[in-house]
Image (cartoon, grey):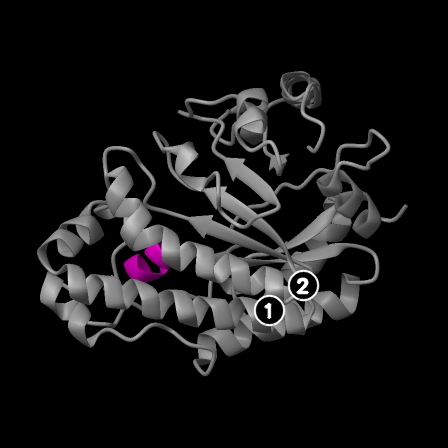
């Protein structure tokens, strides 16, 4: 089988025992856009021999939405597919699909609704992760409208990514930390936008990946998300891979390597191999991995 078939079979639970591998990181700023981004992805894919092409997405909202207080969401408009940023991202996906689509799955990265709204404020989510929650509690109507509008825009972007050649959509879901939104708030405000994007991607024919970002998250909040693959950080999680596989019994599991480990930065080949063996052992009972 080629890489495309191997990844698809592993996700479906019909693999031959081969575990596909993907490792990615943010490329240098000079490789964020256009032909330079395509070249960086292509070189990385060939040099590392990973099993799928994850199209990184640095084409985010420029942060000039003027959001500083809760009432400012009344005037917010999400980045849409007519913007130069998303047009460039769709072109990157198309060019990667033209290069590699016959041999490997191209997975387009979609920053989730919460992450996209954080980008619009001009502040990194990590700088003030509770900002949206505070604004939502103060102006629930305006923030709910902003979340819904962002979900609509991201759904269109996901569908056009599939049309451009993406076989998968990798959705980065923020806001599920238990010390942030409550379960009810997450279900009312955030989950509908997330689910809308994922449903649109699936309808377009994509395999959907959900990456639950950050630590201390409520993974149970994602059990009913329309996705094929689940991924969460190996650092600071309440659930191991095997435990997560039981929670997400109808989904494939992606993950296993702790990206905070110094081994991945400066370890020897033997230390890296031992880290991989440890991850494989932890997932020995996970059928779709």
Residue 80, placed above or below residue 251: below
Residue beneath label 1, please? 161
Q: Secondary structure at mark 2?
A: loop
Residue 100 point in image, percent of width and height: 78, 61
Magenta extent = 113-119
Q: Looking at the image, which is closer to me, 118 or 249?
A: 249
Instruction: Identify the main secondary structure in magenta.
Output: helix
Q: Upstream in the sequence, badge 2 or badge 1? A: 1
**Residue 242: percent from left, percent from top:** 59, 21
Q: Which residue is mark 2?
A: 205
Residue 31 on image: x %, y %: 55, 62
Q: Is residue 177 above or below residue 46?
A: above
Query: Looking at the rendering, which quadrant does residue 136 occupy?
Result: bottom left
Circle 1 crowding by C-alpha within 10 Å: few under 14, some 14–19, many from 20 = many
Residue found at x 51% / y 64% = 30
Residue at screen point 34% across, 29% down: 216
Q: Residue at x 28, y 51 (%)?
A: 188
- Residue at 71 percent across and 59 percent down: it is 42
Find out whether residue 147 is within the magenta segment: no
> Residue 33 location, x and y as percent?
53, 69
């Amino acid at each position: 089988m080629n890489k495309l078939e191997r990844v698809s079979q592993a996700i479906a639970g019909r693999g031959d025992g081969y575990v596909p591998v993907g490792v990615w990181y943010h490329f240098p700023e000079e490789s964020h856009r256009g032909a330079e981004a395509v070249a960086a992805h292509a070189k990385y894919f060939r040099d590392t021999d990973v099993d799928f092409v994850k199209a990184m997405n640095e084409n985010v909202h420029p942060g000039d939405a003027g959001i500083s207080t809760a009432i400012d969401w009344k005037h917010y408009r999400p980045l849409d597919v007519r913007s130069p940023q998303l047009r460039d991202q769709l072109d990157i996906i198309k060019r990667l699909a033209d290069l590699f689509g016959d041999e490997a799955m191209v997975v387009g990265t979609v920053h989730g609704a919460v992450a996209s709204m954080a980008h619009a404020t001009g502040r990194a989510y990590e700088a003030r992760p509770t900002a949206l929650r505070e604004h939502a509690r103060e102006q629930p109507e305006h923030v709910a409208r902003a979340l819904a509008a962002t979900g609509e825009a991201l759904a269109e972007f996901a569908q056009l990514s599939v049309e451009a050649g993406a076989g998968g959509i990798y959705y980065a879901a923020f806001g599920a930390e238990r010390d942030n939104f409550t379960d009810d708030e997450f279900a009312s405000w955030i989950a509908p936008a997330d689910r809308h994007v994922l449903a649109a991607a699936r309808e377009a024919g994509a395999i959907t990946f959900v990456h639950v970002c950050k630590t201390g998250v409520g993974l149970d909040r994602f059990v009913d998300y329309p996705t094929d693959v689940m991924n969460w950080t190996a650092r600071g999680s309440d659930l191991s891979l095997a435990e997560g596989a039981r929670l997400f019994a109808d989904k494939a599991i992606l993950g296993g390597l702790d990206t905070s480990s110094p081994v991945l930065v400066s370890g020897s080949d033997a230390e890296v191999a031992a880290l991989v063996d440890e991850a494989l052992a932890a997932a020995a009972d996970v059928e779709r991995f």
